[in-house]
Image (cartoon, helix red, strand yellow):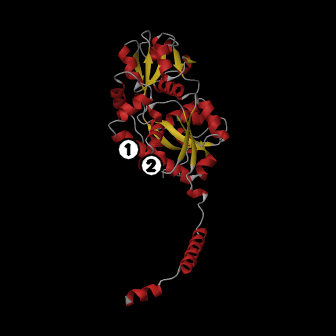
Amino acid sequence: MDWLQRMEGRMPDRRSLFRVSVALVALCVIAVSGLPKPTAAQQTPKLRFAKLGPNLGMARAYVAEAQGFFKKHGLDVEVTEFRNSPELNTAIVSGAADIAITGFAALLVARQRGLPVKAFFVETSSPFYYLLASASIDSMKDAVDKGAVVGVSGIGSLDYTVARYMFRRAGLNPDKLKFIQAGTPGQRTAALEAGRVQLALSAIPEKYAVLRRGKVKEIGRMSDYAKNFALEMFWGREDYIAGNPDVVRRFLAAMDDTASWIRTSPEAPAVLARWMGLGYPEAPADVKEALREVTYPTVSEHKANLDSLLAGAEPLADDALERGALKADSPKALVLQSFDTRYVK
């Protein structure tokens, strides 16, 4: 018992234990209060992202949100879908949105109006536009000779610009055609099948189903005139792109993940078909076939092939110069004026 008595004699009483506990708590409070508080940079950055309706050219923005890639890279992204390019342009310039995705034509229209915007990434590279015609039109030349009516989403829109580009590259005068507003891609081809217009520009995978119905025919392919086409761009205000490098890099990291997912995931065609609202049975197979024609460049691929990717924007720049909408020494010079390369060099 001697050893037990000795141990009991060494044990502190309750008052001593209380004093020790209070001291430990005080030390912890001091230690925690001395730690640096989280800064704004350490918080999840917010990004307001603007886009138009669903098509394969805009697939990555949807995938990044649906598959959680924005969250993976520490971004809180608010996605807003706009009905048309003018509304989207207004949102970007007013500061209601930070980054947008559209065709390069919309950005050129904004720059034509003196708005301080630039592109910073080629989201989609693919010349996947096709010129469809009614039975009364035999060829592109025949369309010009007859002064055919062309259904487009709007004057100055991407499909309007591409259609004019194709005719000019074919050595034909697009000014002899009549361009009218006919809505979305689906609405345009419906107007063509109903005989309300004689020409319409279609893209993949939508054109597969249209041609299967047998009411219209294909008379031209953009790939006959441009092997590399910068279909969609990420862009924003110049000051935002320059002043938010962390947000932009996180955003592009998420885009890299989406490119990998689309390329490798067996479920991608069916997921994208549902997102695009293609409810017919052949839709997943059509999307799978269409993805063979679409390239979603990564950051590393931009760095390795920047010149060729930017050259894909020259057809639209050439059209803007041809119409006198903007001024530059060449289409290449206009593209370089309109593109901030800091994130892809």
> Which of the two residues, 1 or 278, is positioned nearer the viewer here?
1
Tell me the quarter of the picture where residue 20 sits.
Answer: bottom right
Seen in the image, is 31 located left or right of residue 258?
Answer: right
Q: Is residue 208 above or below residue 241?
A: above
Can you give x and y, in whole percent of width and height, for residue 170 in the image? 45, 24
What amino acid is at disc 1? Answer: Ser
Residue reaching furthest to the front: 1
Give the image location of residue 115, x and y in percent: 66, 39
Q: Amino acid at mark 2?
A: Val
What residue lies at 34% left-to-right and 31% top-to-bottom? 288
- Residue 250 image point, x, y percent: 50, 50
Rendered residue at 55%/47% (across/down): 340
**Is residue 228 visible in this depiction of the protein?**
yes
Instruction: Locate the N terminus by quadrant.
Output: bottom left
Bin the neighbour count of mark 1 within 10 Å (Cα to Cα): few under 14, some 14-19, many 20 and up: few
- Residue nearer the viewer, 33 or 184: 33
Residue at 45% in and 16% down: 141
Q: Is residue 201 above or below residue 308?
A: above
Give above or below for 191 relative to 228. above
Q: Earlier in the sequence, mark 2 or mark 1?
A: 1
Q: Residue at x 34, y 35 (%)?
A: 267
Instruction: Give whichever of 98, 115 is nearer the camera.
Output: 98
**Label 2 secondary element:** helix
Expressed as whole percent of the image width and height from the top left, the position of residue 338 reads 57, 42
Q: Which residue does the numbered mark 1 point to in the structure image?
A: 260
Is residue 324 visible in this depiction of the protein?
Answer: no
* Residue at which label 2 appears: 299
Callout 1: SS: helix
Indicate which label's residue lies in the foreground, 2 or 1: 1
Dot 2 crowding, Cα within 10 Å, few <14, some 14–19, many 20+? some
Left or right relative to 146: residue 128: left
In the picture, the disc for residue 52 is none
